[in-house]
Image: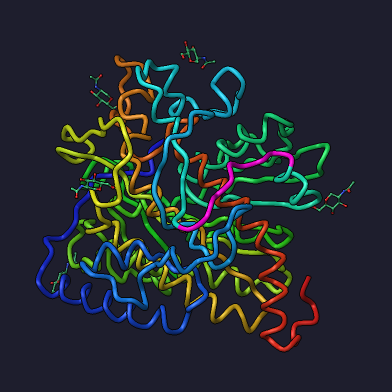
Amino acid sequence: METPFGRSHGQPKTTTIVLTLILLTLLFLTIIPVFYPSLGYPFFLLKALSPKPSPTTAYQPELQTPIKITAGEDCDIFSGKWVPNHNAPYYTNTTCWAIHEHQNCMKYGRPDTNFMKWKWKPEGCELPILNPAQFLEIVRGKSLAFIGDSVSRNQMQSLICLLSRLEYPKDVSQTKDESFKRWIYPSYNFTMAFFSTPHLVKAEERDPNGPTHTGLFNLYLDEFDERWTTQIEEFDYLIISGGHWFDRPMVFYENHHIVGGHYCLIENVTDLTKFYGLRKAFRTTFRAINSLENFKGVTILRTFAPSHFENGVWNQGGNCVRRKPFERNETTLDGDSLEFYMIQIEEFESAKRDGRKKGKRYRLMDTTQASLLRPDGHPSRYGHWPHENVTLYNDCVHWCLPGPIDTWNDFLLHILKMEGVRSHQERLYSGGERTGFK
Ligand SMILES: *[C@@H]1O[C@H](CO)[C@@H](O)[C@H](O)[C@H]1NC(C)=O
Ligand SMILES: *[C@@H]1O[C@H](CO)[C@@H](O)[C@H](O)[C@H]1NC(C)=O
Ligand SMILES: *[C@@H]1O[C@H](CO)[C@@H](O)[C@H](O)[C@H]1NC(C)=O
Ligand SMILES: *[C@@H]1O[C@H](CO)[C@@H](O)[C@H](O)[C@H]1NC(C)=O
Ligand SMILES: *[C@@H]1O[C@H](CO)[C@@H](O)[C@H](O)[C@H]1NC(C)=O
């Protein structure tokens, strides 16, 4: 099934849930900036939630030294706005063959092209458009794995297209299964892989139909999905992401026993919510990585990218028909998307603390705000022919190529560039105890 998506069966938000969320949020916002002052923390969240940002949390561009070359460590590249870019796009569906059918929006008659012509402008610095030569030089002799659902594959295909101005990769997949791809860039000996694992942990379809006719899944929340966890030890970079599949009905197992579910409608199975499942899945994912003795790479969390259905849920007329980005003041991260985001950040920070002792490196690719501001970037009904009977008729989850998701790879290049600097600093802070560190 193509779509990482299912009907949203959010529990009616009780006061308790809301209060807990608010408390957690406040706690989170209070603690994080204090303990992680240099994290490049998502300031947009603070702004979105507090009417008057306090001096300690507000971003103050006038205090920054003007940065012309590129974003420095003191600039939060994930906080900003979209500005017109007349030079975009940098590839088309005729120059790049890697665009997945359902994201080839021009092929299916999308009438407008302005959605391709924007560039992310962080507050206080510039984020350069990905330079393929620079990217491939940095990753020469290295390997990168995308681990997640079809949105993760969407980003990989954007990367292939962005790099295609210089070189196309060779398909060296070890299987015919499209869920596990492996590519190599011959001139650079750069390996790229995709591991399809929509739930990140061990999972199986229990019932292809299920309460919502979108499948009911068994999730083994404390068990690794060994199809990828056994394959990643030699990789230099992992990009982990997930979220949309947790909207579907699930049965949760822990220690081989059913502990609950999310809208599974099975007698005597407690509804623990999708948030419970998402949190445990990310916890187990990071535990898998931290447990890999020989893994010396960098783990990058690519945070949740909200969908943009309006005027209904996905199968009840919901659609995304906007034709330009939101201004920052036009929308705010809330509801399930905010909770998914917070859970990912919390589990990430916790894994990073545990991993530090073992010399594991974690980085954040916070695509949430940039993506939230792009309701215009999805295929909508241009992901297939009008007469085609597809599950997700109006796709407001994936991203047209070319499109806003190309910016995620601008973020990626920035992270790779900063890596040398950061690793050096961390070695200093940790007192050089990590001898096996590369
Ligand atoms: C590319 O898009 C054009 C419309 O801009 C469409 O006519 C064509 O079929 C597409 N080509 C491919 C290879 O997808
Ligand atoms: C290519 O890179 C891999 C690591 O990703 C390395 O093991 C191998 O020796 C390299 N091959 C060549 C020909 O440089
Ligand atoms: C559900 O729990 C009740 C009360 O403990 C029990 O009588 C019933 O058999 C259970 N149903 C199933 C399907 O396990
Ligand atoms: C949002 O900000 C823009 C300028 O950045 C302004 O023109 C617009 O009026 C604002 N909209 C709202 C709803 O405050
Ligand atoms: C679309 O496909 C589904 C499942 O394959 C089927 O139940 C439904 O009747 C089809 N609808 C149309 C309009 O063909």
Query: Where is residue 114 drawn, in percent x and y?
Result: 39, 26
Q: Quadrant of ligand 5?
A: top left
Is 79 on the left-hand or right-hand side of 273?
right
Place of residue 400 in the rendered image (x, y in percent of width and height, measured from the top left) = 43, 31
Residue 194 horizontal side relative to residue 100, left or right: right
Height in image: 196 above or below 37?
A: above
Q: Quadrant of the C terminus?
A: bottom right
Q: Nearer the viewer, residue 325 or 28?
A: 325
In the rendered image, the quadrant that contains the N terminus is top left
Residue depicted at x 50% and y 51% = 148
The residue lying toward the viewer, choosing from 182 and 438, is 438
Identify the residue at image location x=67%, y=35%.
Answer: 163
The question of residue 148 being in magenta is answered with no
Instruction: Report x, y in % for residue 7.
Output: 23, 45
Main SS of the magenta part reads loop
Q: Which residues are magenta?
A: 124-133
Q: How many marks?
A: 0
Is residue 401 shown above or below 27?
above
Question: In front here: 305 or 287?
Answer: 305
The residue shown at (30%, 25%) is 381
Q: Is residue 17 visible?
A: yes
Q: Position of residue 269 (x, y in %)?
A: 22, 66
